Amino acid sequence: MDFFSSMRVSASGLEAQMKRMNTISSNIANAETTRTAEGGPYQRQDPVFAAVTDRESFGEILSNELDENVQGVQVQQIQKDERPPRMVYNPSHPDANADGYVAMPNVNTVEEMANMISAQRSYEANVTAMGAAKSMAQKALEIGR
């Protein structure tokens, strides 16, 4: 794997984790939203990751067989969580049903915080990998002095 391939793979990881963090932030921000444009409470969302081959051009594919199995990541879609909403008893709420229950979003803030920490650690790992690749390239250039 060459320097640019390793940087592209790490960059794809950074982008995917940033999208994951944005989705988590949206889930936390809407944890109490009982009305949406579609009707009903907000539904929690999750990014779906997919591995993609790291190839820039046709020339790269032909010239470098060592990179054949190098894969980056991308967010394929943002999928709604199909778990049912939480039912909370609050008869004074404007969205309460006849029994006094309000359909609240299926967002668990503890779960979201754990996901946020995981995304942060993955982002940091990709930054560290980029730093290591940069350091290795600098050391290789110093050999020629």
Image (cartoon, rainbow, N blue to C red):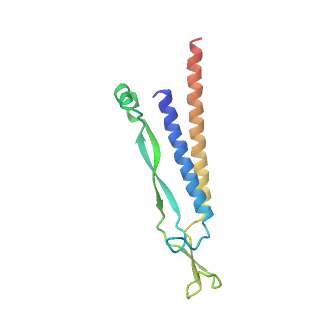
Q: Nearer the viewer, residue 61 or 128?
A: 61
| Residue 136, picture quadrant | top right
Give coordinates of residue 36: x percent, y percent.
54, 71
Give coordinates of residue 39: x percent, y percent.
51, 74
In which quadrant will I find the N terminus? top left
Which residue is at a point 65% across and 84% down the rendered structure image? 92
* 25 over 132 or under it: above or below: below
Q: Residue furthest left?
A: 62
In which quadrant will I find the C terminus? top right
- Count numbered badges in the picture: 0
* 75 over 99 or under it: above or below: above
Which residue is at a point 54% across and 51% down the rendered structure image? 19
Which residue is at a point 60% across and 56% down the rendered structure image? 114
* 133 over 25 or under it: above or below: above
Which residue is at a point 52% across and 70% down the rendered structure image? 37
Q: Residue furthest top?
A: 145
Q: Residue furthest front?
A: 37
| Residue 23, picture quadrant | bottom right
Q: Is residue 101 left or right of residue 75?
A: right
Q: Residue furthest bottom?
A: 98
Give coordinates of residue 25: x percent, y percent.
60, 57
Q: Is residue 44 left or right of residue 66?
A: right
